[in-house]
Image (cartoon, helix red, strand yellow):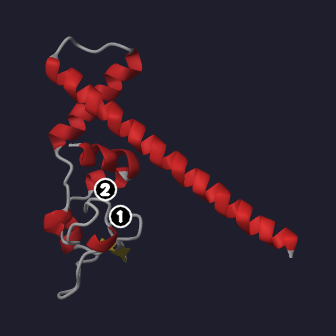
Amino acid sequence: MTRGVWIILTSPQLSALPCAKCKAWVVNEDWTLYERGGKNQRRPLGTVPPCHICPKIPQGDEPVPESAVELTPQLYRAYVHYRRCRAVGRFPDDDLVEDNARIFLAVEEQVESSRMERIELSMRTLGAVLGGLFRG
């Protein structure tokens, strides 16, 4: 469940691209279907989908469609419900809704923390590069 929410937050375009589509059709770098002449292009026989770079594949798992964490319609609806409740500041008195909210909030916090770490690393790297330019 947490992996599915992570995908919603970090790669929302993958929410609409099931692995079966990616196996059958050529996809662009932004995970949209590749078109030529206004038509989607079938994946040529013998070629593999880009599972090795797909965020749906948990780190350390074999990069094949069978390893992917697919986003279910139920999870998507539950997350949309959580966001709506959070936006208006009212949650129903329901154990399942509360459990989901706790998980969704934790994943949102993890994603935000990860984003901040990447920004800090980028700033340190930029500082080192600029510092090297001005010292030399």
The residue wearing badge 1 is 31
> Viewed as shown, does residue 86 lie left or right of 57?
right
* CB under 8 Å between discs 2 and 1: yes
Which residue type does callout 1 highlight?
Trp
Which residue type does callout 2 highlight?
Leu
Q: Nearer the viewer, residue 71 or 106?
A: 106
User: From what the image shows, is residue 125 above or below residue 72?
Assistant: below
> Viewed as shown, does residue 47 lie left or right of 87?
left
> Viewed as shown, does residue 13 lie left or right of 76?
right
Q: Secondary structure at mark 2?
A: helix
The quadrant holding residue 22 is bottom left
The C terminus: image quadrant: bottom right
Q: Nearer the viewer, residue 103 or 64?
A: 103
User: Which of the numbered marks, if any, corresponds to residue 117?
Assistant: none
The quadrant holding residue 135 is bottom right
Question: Mark 2 to mark 1: distance in Å?
Answer: 7 Å
> Viewed as shown, does residue 64 lie left or right of 84?
left
The residue wearing badge 2 is 14
User: From what the image shows, is residue 52 above or below residue 122?
Assistant: below
Q: Nearer the viewer, residue 53 or 130?
A: 130
